Image: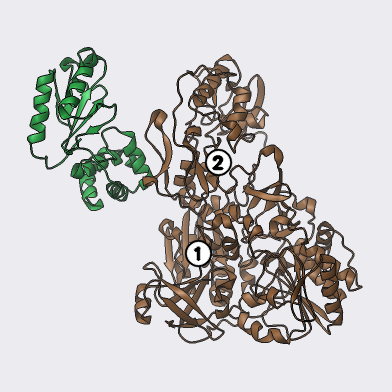
Chain colours: A brown, B green
Amino acid sequence: MSDALPTKPTMVTISINGKEVQAKPGTILVEAAAQAGIEIPIFCYEPRLGPPIGACRMCLVEVEGMRGLQTACSTPVAPDMVVHTNNEAAATAQDGVLELLLANHPLDCPVCDKGGECPLQDRTFKFGPGETRFVEPKRHFPKPLDLSTEVAIDRERCIACFRCIRFSQDVSEDGQLGFQERGAGTEVATFSGEPYESRFSGNIIDLCPVGALTSIPYRFVSRPWDVQNAPSVCGLCPVGCNTELTMREGETKRTTGRPNPNMTVEEGWLCDKGRWGYPAAWSADRILRPLVRDANGTMVETSLEAAVDAAARLIAASSATQILVGAASTVEDGFLAQELAAVLPNAAASRLGFPDSADLEPLRALPRAELSDIDTAGAVAVVGGDVTNRHPIVELRLRKLVRNRGALAMVGPRTSPLDARATFGARTAPGQLSSGLAVLAAALEGASAPLIIWDEADLANEPAAAAELARIATAAGARQIELAVDVNGRGLRALGLPCQTAPVAAGALVAVNADPLESPGAMAWADAIDGVGAIIAVATHRSAITERADVVLPTLMHHEVEGVLVSTTGRAQRLRPGSRGPREAAAAWELLIALSHRTGTPLPFRTPAQAFAAVAAARPPFAGLSYSVVGDEGAPTTHVAQSSAPQRSTDAVGDGIALVVTTEIFGDAVSWRSDALVSRRTPAHLVLAPQQAATLGLVQDQRARVSSPFGTCILPVVVDAQAPEGAAFVAMGPPASGTSALLAGEQVPVNVMIEVAE
Amino acid sequence: MTAADIKAHIDPIRHEYADGRSLVLPALKYAQTEQGWLPPEALAAVAEATGYSQAYVESVASFYDRLYLEPVGKRVVSVCITLSCMLRGSDELIEGMCEHLGVEHSHGAVTTPDGAITIQEAQCLGACDKAPCIQVDAENTIGPLGQSEANALLDELRAADRPRELWR
């Protein structure tokens, strides 16, 4: 070894409370102390919000040789530093700061939602004065105001730590929160008292170290000592943010970021859909009881036992069985569908969702990156997609990249709030991503740790662009992140489940959390559905397929089940139940196993963990994984090239202008079912550029008839000056909107004719 | 006042401010010269001109006593109530001035019903040698002032035309 060479010291040694502590140079004292198991009290310190600001003064410590006391949150370690966090000077200061913070604090802990999980409470007990000397009247503000429809603000409780304001100004960059007035009158407010409108507004509740910002849907619902928390994963988009589910009396009462955020994935931030989507479990269309169609054709409520028996009889009586798994199903559900199909005579399992494409293989074969790698990239190119609406948390990472002075390139047909932050952006015409790629190469060239982020659907429909992008990325040495279309599309594909793009012809259809009548290709399915012998719907909510089904088996939502989802970056992550779900419902994995028993071909699994162990043994992408390996933080799956992926047809079908679809963040089924998101939901609509709208004779809010070769739907028109000309941008809306009629099951590019609807 | 007007005012003095944030203050003072106070539209124009968020601009404006987020009178009279002036009778002075104007004395700003004059308490105006002193808008501090002189000044201000620009 090179022990003769002078080396830079990699660690500095400091003393904290007489204890020798090793820390990397530049470590902040608070962190160095925490590593040594010494707690320095903090309120405003939160590294995820950017550099420390020393606003609350809670972390005062004595550093020998430095005049006065230092804020440990903003003081880096230095060699031979001697720090006292609990000597008389430090303790008196901490005591004093807490006494001042509490001087105007209402101490209404018994009626405060934060009580019991409140850093101010905890630190007062541990570091603060036992009693106050403040006898004067406290400041008073009217009690809680609605900062938005989901967040309540109680200004009396605020300790002016700046966290929420820093989140608004520096993380989500919505710039809406600020302090108003000064001194004891300081209050957090929005401009002119307008409602706080942000896709990420709920994070300020998690950040608030006191009870000033509370969740309106969770208001007065429960106490920390009445609940159990389960670390889980959000199943509403492919990002797979790590969440914590708060369960009381068998029901999920709240979703929050984890206390120990997964820094690789969501960094502790959640979008408002992920945070307030769980009340969809109680929507009016939730299926609570099993249903079986009787001799007269009417659906009759029955027991789960009887319904599973009826389903098994229908399967046994059918010449063939197709098990169709929905795109958000867990890995276990997909695997058990495959296993059940293997033991039933003449049966097959497939998935509903975005089809496989061999053309994406060169991109998928590039080295994989995690979302956290965006932070350290010198340049990131986003090609296609709509991260703001479909992968919301990725937007926060990209904003951070730009703050860290990384270059951001945005290429694609859709407008994005990130366009204003992009170093360079190329708005390409639909189907012409290639035209934006030339400049992209220059952006990635020479950048440190470059990254490409590419949209599965957009690039699958443009094989030439996919090949070119793969070539550019290889030349630049870039790693890649795929923006998957489906929640667990990656996991189901890795199982080898083929995508069902055409309707099933005959026999029995078992639809597991899948509704082909409300998915792309819906019209073809509608024509073919009468030819299907028997329909067994395993579903959480009523939809077109449950109306047609012969047996409906109620099942559980993501926050009610155990299972594994594979995120957009390829991480296998565990769902854990934070709710028992309806009494007569069962998890899809359990129903599939039950069906195997009732059809006389029992599968050898009793738990999802056993099923996952079998997945790991039988499917190479999951090799080496188990529930314990996946753990709380998730573990990467291995990409295995799919040799069998079919070539897709990529020529646009139909006459008229190109159809560009997206699903708005609050425009999906969950947002429309969750009563916590009533004020946020957006319906399906058609966005046209002004010129395009004028040519078609359409004005704002008018209704337009949109027709593709596959189907027709009527949508309200939104005229948007930002939208590119020459294309029809359709926000899909919740399933019942009928927009899926416009698309083929293969989800190939489509042109649409648009006219004024009478 | 438009963002362009504000930008035309701050661009020539931009070099005097090391940090763009500090430029918000002269922009706000200038935006206030039009109506004498800052309606939300004026704050929005300052935000646009300086590139900071509306919430931040309002946050700065709400910090300062001389930046008004509510309508104030044609002229604003600030009466110093800090130590020297108080010892020399500022309490009685402001009480008398309020009586003369026919308004109730308060610790905040009070405007006459006709919108002519706003009277407010001010912390030290830096003119202890002239105690008790007052300041009209951002003009020179006047003092020492007896009750009758002060009342005469108020009458004079009420009768005078509104200045073209309201620097406060």
Decide if residue A139 is on the left or right side of residue A472: left
Q: Chain of mark 1?
A: A
For the residue pair A298 and A386, the one nearer the viewer reads as A298
Location of mark 1 (residue): A682
**Residue A237 falls in which quadrant of the image?**
bottom right
- Graded by Cα atoms within 10 Å as few (under 14), some (14 to 19) or many (20 or more), the crowding at tag 2 reads many
The residue type indicated by label 1 comes to: Thr
Where residue B139 appears, as percent x and y from the top left, is 15, 30
Where residue A58 appears, as percent x and y from the top left, is 53, 27
Decide if residue A264 is on the left or right side of residue A198: right
Tell me, for residue A207, which label it has, or none: 2
The residue type indicated by label 2 comes to: Leu
Q: Quadrant of the C terminus of chain A?
A: bottom left
**Picture mark count:** 2
Residue A472 visible (yes or no)? yes
For the residue pair A425 and A546, the one nearer the viewer reads as A546
Tell me the SS state at disc 2: helix
For the residue pair A529 and A660, the one nearer the viewer reads as A529
Q: Which residue: 25% across, 38% down?
A: B16
Q: Which numbered disc, 1 or 2, marks the residue closer to the eye?
A: 1
**Residue A240 falls in which quadrant of the image?**
bottom right
Q: CA distance from mark 1 to mark 2?
A: 27 Å
Q: Which residue: 66% across, 82% down?
A: A525
Where residue A38 appears, as percent x and y from the top left, is 65, 27
Decide if residue A497 is on the left or right side of residue B149: right
Residue A640 visible (yes or no)? no
| Residue at the extreme front of the image, as rendered | A296
Where residue A602 appears, as percent x and y from the top left, is 90, 69
